[in-house]
Every structure is written in C-alpha cells, then in structure tokens.
Image: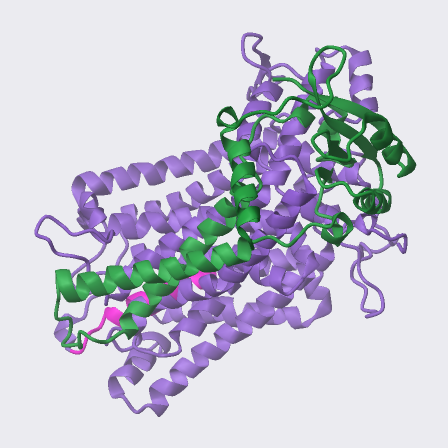
Amino acid sequence: MSDTHPDQTIAQQASGIASVQPVARRQPIIPGTKDDGTLTEDPGLRAPLVLGDRSFGEITDIVCGYAEAPMPKIWLTAFTITASIAAIANAMIFYLIITGVGVWGLNNQVDWAWDITNFVFWIGIGHAGTLISAILCLLKQNWRTAVNRAAEAMTIFAVICAGIFPGIHVGRVWMAWFLAPVPNANGIWPNFRSPLLWDVFAVSTYATVSVLFWYMGMIPDVATLRDRAALRLHKGVSRGFKMPMPLGNGLALHFMPKPDQIRMFVYGVMALGWRFSSRHWHRYEKAYLMLAGIATPLVLSVHSIVSFDFATSVVPGWHTTIFPPYFVAGAVFGGFAMVLWLLIPLRMVLPNFSDLLTLRHLENMAKIILLTGTMVGFAYSMEFFIAWYGANEFEFAAFANNRVNPAKAPYWWAYWTMITCNVIFPQVFWFRKMRQSPLVIWIVATAVTIGMWFERFVIIVTSIHRAFLPGEWHMFFPTWVDILTFVGSCGIFLTLFLLFLKFLPMFALSELKIVMPQSHTDDHH
Amino acid sequence: MDIKSLINDAKSLGADYFPMLMRKSAPKFVTESGNAVYGIVAEFSETPKVFSAAKKVRDAGYSKWDVHTPFPIHDMEEAMGIKTTKLPLMAGGAAITGVCIAIVLQWGTSLVLYPTVVQGKPFEAWQPFVPIMFELGILLTAFMCIFGMLALNGLPRFHHPLFSHERFYRVGNDRFFIAIEATDPNFDPIKTKKLLEEAGGTDITLIEDVD
C-alpha cells in the first residue's frame, strides 16, 4: 500500500469498495469462554449462522476480500510447496507412461493395489461435497451455506485426483479410449454387462454434474466479484499489478493490466452476464433444487457402482452384498473428515472466517462423522459376522486369517489401523466438549482420513493377496513410484484447492445472505 | 400452454440470442441525446421495502419489469406475479431422453451389433443395463437444468443497458433495484417515476439503451 496516496486509501475505505476486510471481531461473544454463542442447547433459540451482527455489505466485503486481497505470503509459501509436490505426481505419471505399470509393485496375484486404493479413496472424499450441497439442501439444513462452496470445490478436485488412477493403471494409456462406448477397429463394442463400464459412466457423470452444480452456484458470486472490480475501475481506485516476491513488497509492473481489469474480464465471462434479476432467480432456484434432487440419488449411486467393481466378483472378501451402503457411508465419512481437515486451519488463518464458519457448523459436522463412523463400524462387524455365519470357509479365512489375526495375517496392522482410526477415534464425539473443540475435531479428521485410506487398502489388497491355492500367495510391496504418485496426488488436490481459495468466492455469498435476518421480507426480526 | 405463448417464448429467445435478426420497433421514448429509453430504475436499501414496492408495481399493472436483488427473496414470485417456469417439464423430458439413449445404446450394441457371451449370462437380461440407464438419465437432466435455465433466462448476455448505470454495480452487494422497461404498454416517464417514488425508491434514474 506504500505507493498509494494516503487520501486515496481513505477514499477507498470510505466508499466501502476497497478490498479490505471489515474489522475482525477478536473477542468471543460470551466473554471468558471459548463459546461463540452458537452452541445453544435451547430448542427455542435458533443459533445465528452468521456472527458479528454483519450487514450484507460486510459479508460481501469479507468473502470477496479473500479473492481480491493481494496474495498473502503464507498462501504463496503453501502454494509453492503443494505445487512442487504436484509436479512430482506429474513426473511419476510420465515415468509410468514411458516405462509401463511394472514400475509399480504390482505382481501376478496383487494386480490391484495402491492405484485402485487411491482411486476409491479420492472418489470417496468427493462425496461429502455433494452430500452437503444436495442432500442437506433438500433437507433444508441452512447451516450448509457456510461450507457448501468449499466442499463442492473439494469434491471436484478429489474427483480429478481419482480420475488419474484408473486412467493410468490400464498400462497402455493411449488405449484408454476403449472405455468409451465406441467400437474399436475390429468392430467390438465395450461390454455393457461389466461393472467396470458402469463405473466409467458413473464417475464421468458424477464429475460432470459436480462441476455443473458448483459452477451454477458460483454464477451470482462471480457476478458480484465482476461488479466490484468494475466499480473500482470506474472510481479509479484499482491497484496496479504487482508481481509477488518472496521477500519484501511485490514488484510493481506498470506495463501489465491492472488486476481489476483482468478480473472484470475473467469473472465477467464466467458470470455469463448475470444481472441478479428476480425472474432469473426464480428459474435459477428451481434449477438448483432439481439439480439437488438428482444429485442425491447420483451420489448414492456412484459409490454403490464403485463397490460393484468388487461385489460382483467371486473373490472372498469382495463378494458381499453389504458393499454398496457400506461404501456410501464410508465415502461420506471420509469426505466430511477431509472438509473439516481443510477448513479448520482456514478458520485460524483467515480473518473473519470464524464468523461464517461457527463452532455450531463444526459440531454438526462432527456429529455426522460420529454417525457415519458408527455405520462404518457396524458394516465392519456385520461383514465379519456374515463371513462366520455364512459358513463359507474361504470367506471366513479371508477375514480371520488374512486380516484380523496378527498371528496369521501379514496385513493385520493395516486392518487394526483401519479399526482404530475409523471406529475408535470418532467415539470421542459422544462428548460435547470434544465435538466443540476445533483441535480435537482436526485430530480426529486426520485419523479418519488415514483410516479411510487403509480401509480401501485392506479391502483390495488383503482380499487378493492370498487366492485359493497357497502357491498363489504373494505379498504386495509398494515401490517408490507407488508412494510418490500417491503423495503427488495429494499435492495436486491441495494445489487446486489453494487456487480455488485465492481466486474464487469460497463462500456461497447469495446463500449466506438468505440465512441472515435482514433477508426476511417482514419486520419480525 | 397455448401456441401463442410458445411463439412469444421463441420470439423472446430470438431477441436475446439473435438481436440482429429481429426487427426493432421504433422506440416509444427517446432522450434528448437521441438514444432510446430502456426504462427507469429505482434503488432500495432494505428487503421489506423492495418487497412491498414490488407488490405496488405489480398492482399498477406493469408486465415488463424486474426486481434485481443480491439474493433470491422468498415469495418474490408472488409479489411480482411470475408464473412458474416450464423448467421441470423440460428436465423430465431430458431424463426420459437420457434413459432412451441408454436403452438403445446398450441393447443395440450388446444384442445386435456385437452380441457377446459373458459368463454364460442370458442376452435378454435387462438388469445389467440399469446402472447406465440411470446415469445417462441423470446426466441429461443435469444438462437441461443448467443449460435450460440459462436459455430461458436469455443468458449468456454480456451487454445490457442496466450495466451502464453505475449504482447498479452494487446489486450483487447490498442494494435492491426495480427496473421498469419502456416497452411496457403502461410505461410513462412521469407516471412510472412517480409510482416508484411513492413506493419508496431512491436515486430514480432514466436508463438509455445505447447501441
């Protein structure tokens, strides 16, 4: 700000159009406690969803301020790290393509390992976003407005990471078009009776609908960003372009267009000329509700179909009817953990964030973690019970001897990591104090994310590493390429998420305004 | 749904996307600078005020007018007298189309073009075809929901006379606007302005339609 004339700075703040955050509220609403006033247990009181008695203008300033402020140093640091990790993934994928899938630790027996584990892990992460935006929308859960945009973004980035693995695990990547419903050179069509082809349709439909849902929700908010940039240009208070530097102030580049000019163009194209017309809003809301209505069965179908990849086979440990609901519950469980894992640090770093994402929001999500974690725990025990009760010795062996029993199963540690992280850790949320502590929630979310990766590893690798004949028994050992590809995919995910945080509205602005008391048409507030 | 309303819909779509093909009628009102008048815009600062003002404009018998608000206001359809949209019907049509495409694609390829015996399962089984029927139905419905919504709204449309009004840039922030178009048969620069003043609007401005 040193090159701005002080009068101009004052003028910016006075006209309310400068991209500065409104004054952050440092004190908790109830002095002497950590309570922000949203944790009321009185059913007669409705907890406020936006804190600090904010006006519409302040909410706009807060949310748009994140996208308009110059890149903070912490963001640049984080972005540099994650982008470097993402580059490792690209290098590993390139190495795999020019060499072959032999660079992974796969063998004749274990022909699906980390690749498909990562695929199911990432696709499952995505499900929380759709659950928040679609199912909670149909259930009229207004608290979703604070998290839906970030969760939907996370969904899309997770689906991108998921899409990488089945694409590259086929070996000859240039033949991946065989997945498409077109005949090959010999006139042979893909087999529509195969769950793997159902999976192609389910995941690609899911990715498309998620992107559309996310984009449609963002149209009014990018229109707000467009209008703010245009207003600043009209008033002549736009900042010049500054190249961010590792140390000190940014380097002013006068030949570059002003950031507001770029914004007006890019956001302007993205907003499609949205002008906040009530006639448009009417159709928009109808379309949004219908999208929520169809996204709900879609999200349930996607992980069901992913589970068919396993359940329709005859491999002991895979061949179970419980898989579809078990996979869906696990996906929601892991996805919510990832949402919390990403958003809790943001509450600490970004100013005013905790006014929009209150302790109540965290507590509600912790309750969903507890519910779905218990469902997953029930599925684990039911799977084991049926393996015993069904009296199929191979199925029982797949559980008892290949997974659970430390004396016999080489992968017992994977199984018990999964149980500890997914079943035991979430139990702390039975206690109110634990559900209300962001630190505890973040630790549990970390555990659940690890546990859900191990769940997929346990299901996939421990079921196939020992076939019916002991001569076919092989262990799976990941190579460095396996490990770095997975680590790199986390880098891709975080890089995309950081780009989203910096350049797009990370809260659903128009929806936040609906849940504020000033949006009511009568005066009873 | 009669023929007339369908023709009107088609005309308004044409005006939105292919303005160069539509014959323009001579403007009823022209400003001193010679530009056609687009309409009159009034600004409001609170939700209840714009809501009651919208009811007044509706009761005054206007048809070509709009309320611009930063968020969808509950019950605004009634306050403005907007008829419900045909979008659900269109989405239903898209869903049926998607399912039909999936049926033709799967039966056609698996039974006619390249019948394959898979694990000895019968050709006439319909069950394995259900997932893709479902997915394609959902996909086309989603396309219709968003692209149909945009088409009915006449979007994308990057230029609009309202964007020439500087105060209108706050509509995405915290301001509410009522715009009455000059093409409305009831439009009269003086009477319409008076109506908006009485309804509580501030900064009432005449907007020009500059080509």
* Horizontal relation, residue A108 to residue B131: left or right: left
Going 88% across and 54% down the picture, which residue do you hit?
A: A525
Residue B127's place in the image compared with A155, above or below, is below
Instruction: Locate residue B37 relative to residue B150 in the image: left or right.
Output: right
Which colour is chain B painted? green
Q: Report the front residue among A240 and B13.
A: B13
Residue A390, quarter of picture: bottom left
Q: Would residue A360 be found to the left or right of residue A214 on screen?
A: right
Q: Nearer the viewer, residue A477 or B111?
A: B111
Image: magenta residue range: A450-468
Residue A491, image x, y percentages: 43, 42
Q: Nearer the viewer, residue B129 or B144?
A: B144
- Quarter where residue A22 is shown: top right
Would residue A464 be counted in the magenta stretch?
yes
Q: Which chain is purple?
A: A
In the depicted view, which residue is nearer to us: A7 or A107? A7
